Structure formats: C-alpha cells, structure tokens
Image (tube, rainbow, N blue to C red):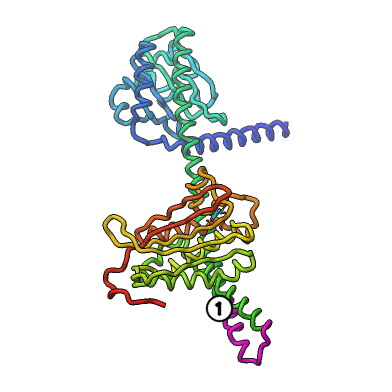
Amino acid sequence: MAPRVDTQAQAQAQAQARERARLAALQRTGLLDSPPEHLFDLITTLAAKALDVPVVLMSLVDADRQFFKSQCGLPAPWAERRETPLSHSFCQYVSMLGEALVVEDARQHPLVRENLAVSEIDVIAYAGMPLTTEDGFTLGSLCAIDTQPRHWTAAELEILEGFAAQIMAEISFRTRVELLDADLGALRASETERRTEMRQIVHDLRTPLNAIYLGLSGLPAMGELNQSQHDCLELARKNATVLGNLVQQMIKVGADDDKGDNPRAPSLPHEMVSRALDQVAALAESAGIRLQYDNPSPLPPISAHAGDLTRVLVNLIANGVKFTPRGGSVSISTSKGSEHGKDVIRFSVTDTGIGIAKKDQGRIFREGVRLDEKADPRRSTGIGLAFCKRVVEEHGGMLHLESAVGKGSTFSFAVPVDRSAPPATPFA
Ligand code: ADP
C-alpha cells in the first residue's frame, strides 16, 4: 500500500506545481484586471452573433475567481463586476482539463449540476473552448452560454474554436513583443554599462600617459644627448602627444555631458592647421606620404573650440595618410568664403589615396564603421569620422566628402568667422 500513497502524493505535488506555473503564465499576460479591449470585445460579440447565443465570455481562470477580459450579454451584477468566484464557474474545468467542455443541459450534468452558475446566472447550456498558450498552459476559456438546453452542432463548436485560436494568436503575439522589449532593454543596459566602463578606462589612461610625457620631457636635463638619441626622444614625445590627443578624442565621443566646459574662443585657422600638422608629421614620414600646406594669405579668426577642431584636422589628415599608398600626398587648404550670407573659413584635406566608393560615402560617418573589416584594429577604430562630424556640426558646419575610388578623397568643412574678434592682422 505504502508505494501507492507515495505515488498519489507525488501526482498531487506535480499537479500543484503545474497549477502554480499556469497561474504564473496567466499573470505574465498582464490581462488579469486589465480594462476591456475593443479587439477581444469584437470577438465575443461576433461569436455571440455567429452562434446565436445570449452570452459569450472570454474567461481567465485565476486561483480563486474567473475574470472576464471580455464579455457579451452577461446580466447584472456580473457584467459590471467582470468576475465571479469559482463557485460560479464552468470555465475552471476547461482550464483544469485543458480541453473543451460541452454541456447541453447543466441541470443534468454530473460535473456542473451543483454549480451556482446554474441557479444564479442561469447557465443551462455551455460550450467552452480552452485558451491554451504555446507552452501548454490553459489560461481559461472562450465560452458560449445559453439559458435553455441546447444541442451544440459540430459547426458551432468549430466556430468557437476558431475564435479561441484568434484570441490566443493575439496573446502570444503580445507575449513575444514583451519578451523582445525586455531583451532590447537588457541589451541597451549592457551597452550603456560597456560604454561607461570604456570611457572610464580611456579616462584613466591619461594619468600614465602624462607620466610618460613628463618622464620624456625630463630626459634632456639628465645629460647631453647625441643627435640620434635626441631624434628618438623627439619621436617618442610627439607620439605621446598624439596618444594623449587620441585619448581626449575618445573621451569626447559619446560624452555629450561635458559640452560647455570649454567655451568657444577666437581661434586662428593657420595655427590650428600647423598644430595638427605637427602631430601627424611623424606618422606621415614613416608612411612615406608628403604633407602639403600652402599658407597663402592671413585669415581672420573663427569662433571655435580650437582643441576639438585641431583634432578634427588631425583625424582627417591621419586618415589621408593611412589610406594613401606610399609616395602619395595629403594637402591641406584654408580659404575665406561665404555661406548663407555669413563669412566662413573653409578647411579641406585632400589625399591621393584609395578613395571611397559612392555607396560607402554616407555610412563612414557612423561610429564603429570601417570599410575594410580586416584592417589592423590598431590602425583603424571607426570612431574618427564620427567624432569629426559631431565637432563640425557643433560648430554649425557640415562635413562634406568628395571621393573617387583609386583617385583620392577630399574632406571639407566651413566654420563661421568670429565677428567679435578685432580685425585680423598678419599671422605667422
Ligand atoms: P578609422 O580611421 O579609425 O577607421 P574613421 O571613422 O576615421 O575611422 O574612418 C572610417 C572608415 O572610413 C575608415 O576605416 C576607412 O575605411 C574610411 N576612410 C576614412 N578616411 C578615408 C580616406 N581618406 N580614404 C579612404 N578611406 C577612408
């Protein structure tokens, strides 16, 4: 005998666990106690018409009640309450068995004849179709009710089953959308976390970099350097500066918050170009690329974040160097012009390099885009142009590109002349 009791207890425990899982699935739909919705009301109304019955219910069976997400024709006070206790529920059997329940005369039916729905709500004939999820949980029933005995035809039951399938298609669609939303939310959160960590790391890089720079600057004081030691030191110092600028630039990309720390000021175009050229000179030399800047006439100052615009130039020139075969050149030009009635200074950087295909010309300005995915990641990060575009736009300009594959590229932009500044004098 003992093993049988065990088996019964096990079966009971399993049934309870399954019911808990079913109730959890029902909660997850978010439909319990939610307001009526046109879509479900349309289904119950159409089903009542198609079957010619006074009442149709979309009933969700909770732990101690049935909740009507939609109802058509239910008498007062049940219609307002939108629920009954399980003492008044036939739908609980549909949910328990996971299959249709068809009753022609409830007063004669052994399962439901004592149910209070018979005496208090006048439920005499009943046909309930299970509302079952893809993972097998029956949430409740779509049921048709008559107040007199009735034979349900196969065609009527088929119609009711079809409407129940429509309801479940809608519920499962909503569940999928919610899951996708949750996935998207989690992805966004982890992306934000990753960006924050990256920014912190990049930010922290500045301290050791400064130490390297200071260390290199202190070397000459320790004793006479010969020419090649001196050249080596200069190269190291220049590249430590380049590295420092890159770090600054990475902090800037994606960090909108620190705008304004650094107000715009009158800045001299030639000075910015010269500083940019200093930073890329070593790179160009080792890549065998000639840098050209004809510095014809004095230009008036522009209203700019000089550090940012210099980094834009560094990026554009460095790209020109990277994407131009040895022996080629990168030329920079600055000129005064007028755009939309305003005086502007136009900057352009032209290379004789590999060029960029028309189809890629729009997307290269997006962060993380590199055309040659196999490119050495140390040389190419795909953040430079996103940064340049942002800074140029912050200055009220647009970054333009003209390019032909195999011939080269020109990146150009214009920045308004600073009107508050005194008239320009000749610049070095
Ligand atoms: P990175 O240079 O770090 O890859 P950028 O955002 O500056 O990132 O450039 C994105 C991509 O655009 C580059 O990987 C390259 O494929 C292309 N590109 C940029 N500048 C040039 C250029 N002057 N000539 C050819 N291709 C370029």
Comparing 164 with 314, the one in front is: 314
Task: Specify whether residue 381 is in view.
Answer: yes
Percent position of residue 158, x then y:
48, 13
Task: Please name the residue that numbered disc 1 is placed on.
Answer: 210
Up/down of 5 relative to 298, above or below? above
Percent position of residue 230, x then y:
64, 83
Boundaries of the magenta span: 207-228
Residue ID at (52%, 63%): 317
State yes or no: Cβ of the residue under disc 1 lies below 8 Å from any atom of ligand 1.
no
Task: Specify whether residue 193 is in view.
Answer: no
Quadrant of res 340: bottom left
Residue ID at (46%, 52%): 401
Residue ID at (54%, 71%): 279
Q: Is residue 245 left or right of residue 69?
A: right
Comparing 319 with 44, the one in front is: 319
Secondary structure mainly formed by the magenta segment: helix
Is residue 227 on the magenta stretch? yes
At label 1, which amino acid type do we have?
Asn
Comparing 200 with 220, the one in front is: 220
Q: Is residue 152 left or right of residue 21?
A: left
Say which quadrant the N terminus sits in: top right
Is residue 379 on the magenta stretch? no
